[in-house]
Image: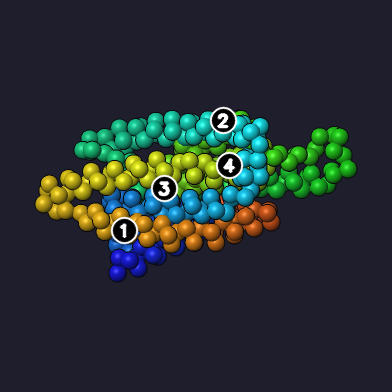
Amino acid sequence: MMLLKVILLAIVQGLAELLPVSSSAHVVVAEKLLGLDPSSPQMTLLLVMLHTGTMFAVIVYFWKTWKETYFSTRARFRPFLVQLIWATLLTGIVGEVLKKIIEKTYFRGAPEAQIEMLFSHLELIAPALAAAGVLILVAGLMKGRQHSSGSVTSKSQSEGFITRRQPSLTFGQAGWMGIVQGLALPFRGFSRSGSTISTGMLAGAEREPAERFSFALAVVLTPPVVLLEAMRLMKAAHAATAAGAPIDLHGSILFSLLGAVFSFFAGLVALKWLSSWLESGRWHWFGVYCLVASAVVLVLHWRGY
């Protein structure tokens, strides 16, 4: 039975992770409906291993593009690497500051408060989904308006009305994407990919470089998060054993690895869909979806999930 639940969660994660609709929110809701505890060490490790599966899907899907764009010459790779380090550093700073603030305020007085305790709170996931939805909607509509204006004035390029396509991001655009990724770390529902790509677009970047850089950030971010959650599970397993209620550590790791495999294949499907939607100018519809999902999550919270 648990294997079937893991497969279901892997499919949900894989399909939703690479779409800007917050896979974490979808997985948390699915876990709630399946009677699982999203904040338990076993489930948080499973979640990050599902992210690992989709991380490899990202590498496979984008490798050819990354190779041509970032790795073809040293002159191209150097600024990309600097931007990646800069954005990731900002993510770590913002995420750690938020983590400490939440643990010292929201969980004030709770013994050994951890940010993962937020993962089962649907009343927090709903507004996070709504915030991501608004950001995606605004970015999609503004970018669509710019492109529409650019096509109308295609004969007046000298007047500066057209947003020229950029092969890569600027240092500032990468920084803003890193900051917003840090904001997404503690809050399930605030879509990492949706918020970072939208931020890049709002900062003046074209969709394609923003998409490529967003998923490159995900590849860098996933391994340390997996390590942290694995350490959390091992610590919880030792504590449970000492208390006389041992956790099946090997079983949890095995299920997590199987979940990563299934999420890998589901992620490849989602990436293809994401790119086609971006290319057709329908980015804002993901924002509409997030707003609807926010209302659904709120209803589930009111019904006791």
Q: Nearer the viewer, residue 192 or 229?
A: 229
Question: Residue farthest to the right?
Answer: 155
Tag 1: amino acid? Leu
Residue indicated by mark 4 = 213
Give neighbour class at mark 3: few <14, some 14-19, many 20+ (Cα, 10 Å).
many
Q: Is residue 16 above or below residue 113?
A: below
Query: Compared to 80, does 19 lie above or below?
Result: below
Amino acid type at circle 3 is Arg
Q: Please report whichever mark, 4 or 2, sits nearer to the chain's N-terminal start.
A: 2
- Left or right: where 117 falls relative to 143: left
Q: Earlier in the sequence, mark 2 or mark 1?
A: 2
Mark 3 and mark 1 in contact (Cβ < 8 Å)?
no
**Circle 1 residues within 10 Å: few <14, some 14–19, many ≥20:** few
> Mark 3 = which residue?
188
Q: Say few, some or many: other residues with alpha carbon within 10 Å of mark 4 (under 14 / 14 to 19 / 20 or more).
A: many
Q: Is residue 256 visible?
A: yes
User: Label 4 near label 3: C-beta < 8 Å?
Assistant: no
- Disc 3 is placed on an element classified as loop
- Which residue has dot 2 on it? 82
Among numbered discs 3 and 4, the one appearing first in the sequence: 3
Pointer 1 with pointer 4, Cβ within 8 A? no
Distance (Cα) linking label 1 and label 4? 31 Å
> How far is the residue under mark 3 from the one under mark 4?
21 Å
Q: Where is residue 80, by image quadrant?
A: top right
Which label sits on residue 254?
A: 1
What is the C-alpha distance between the residues marked 2 and 1? 36 Å
